[in-house]
Image: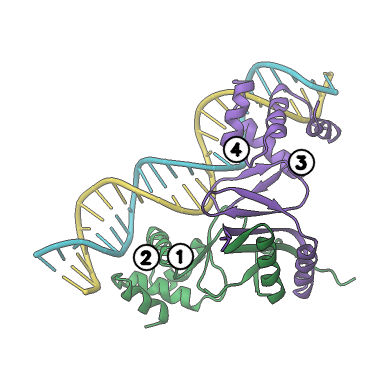
Chain colours: A purple, B green, C yellow, D cyan
Amino acid sequence: MNELERKCVSAGLKMTDQRRAILKVLDESGDHPSVETVYVRVKEIDPSVSIATVYRTLNLLDQLHLVQKHGFNSNFARFETKLEHHHHLIDVETGTVIEFQDDKLEELKREIAARLGYDIVEDMLELYGRKKQLS
Amino acid sequence: MNELERKCVSAGLKMTDQRRAILKVLDESGDHPSVETVYVRVKEIDPSVSIATVYRTLNLLDQLHLVQKHGFNSNFARFETKLEHHHHLIDVETGTVIEFQDDKLEELKREIAARLGYDIVEDMLELYGRKKQLS
DNA sequence: ATATCTGCAAACTGTTTGCGCGGAA
DNA sequence: TTCCGCGCAAACAGTTTGCAGATAT
């Protein structure tokens, strides 16, 4: 029973085979899979799972804050299980995604929002960059 | 003939009544209207315009970099004509978008990217917030 | 026992596209 | 005259939902 599963149980969710399979996939995914990708991976474990269940479960986990739902400027959602707050730098040449975190940035964001009269509920910074040339 | 219209002509687009109406609406919109909103505003000028044309024109303008297309964590696109670099704070309650710019932020982003060995090509910060309560 | 969960298929939403007519250049 | 652009309706993709049966607790 993995961490995610434990949290689901204590959130009062019934632990079905389908959910166990989905949670296993999420737990083992180091990337940012789409619903379709999660679905494909889940079917390798249990081919009977329907995509409707994947959608329902993913949305449920998102509401429980056990996964993070991203838009990534695309017309479909992508998910990650890493819960610590972080941001993404995307290498425009290779598509590689680098995750980062910065305390000064966190403080500055809060400061900016406060100046505008808001409390931050959520936020997202995406840097698109090219590797520096060593000249 | 507004700025947008001039740019369209020099990009080789044919200037039809429909496009003129859409460009006028965009030019006069200080907010970040959705396709539907642009459509409604355009119909006040010319009720015969179809929503397909609004979609086609908006996408065209986006490709020409004459408007900026945003996702804003929503399932529909929103547009703005402001082209100068800035970021957005989205009111999660109302959907209102507030624009901001911050020099310290610009420097910090550059610093973070440099630390990771990158030069920024493009970037996007979105803050989702709730109005502070005056306690 | 019973409330929750499931698969299925149909519905929904935002968006795109093929078609044949019409209008800008 | 020649494309390009248009309105219309159908198609599309991703996602959600009503239903009736199945299952975890």
* Three-letter amino acid code at the position of disc 3: Leu
Residue type, mark 1 in image: Tyr
Please provide percent x and percent y for residue A32.
Answer: 63, 42
Front residue of B28/B82: it is B82
Residue picked out by circle 3 = A66
Dots 2 and 3: beta carbons under 8 Å? no
**Disc nearest the viewer among 1 and 3:** 3
Q: Give the Cα separation between the discs numbered 3 and 4.
A: 15 Å
Whether B115 is drawn above or below B103: the answer is above
Establish if B132 lies above or below A43. Answer: below
Residue beneath label 4, please?
Answer: A35
* Local secondary structure at mark 4: helix
Q: Are marks 2 and 3 on the same chain?
A: no
In the depicted view, which residue is nearer to us: B1 or B62? B62
- Alpha carbon separation for disc pair 1 and 3: 38 Å
Same chain for labels 1 and 4? Say yes or no.
no
The structure residue drawn at horizontal position 73% and vertical position 39%, both measured from the top left corner, is A61
Q: Tell which subunit mark 4 falls on.
A: A
Question: Label 3 neighbourhood size at 10 Å, few (<14), some (14-19), many (20+)?
Answer: many
Which amino acid does the dot numbered 4 rest on? Val
Mark 3 or 4 closer to N-term?
A: 4
Q: Secondary structure at mark 2?
A: loop
Is residue A77 shown above or below B110?
Answer: above
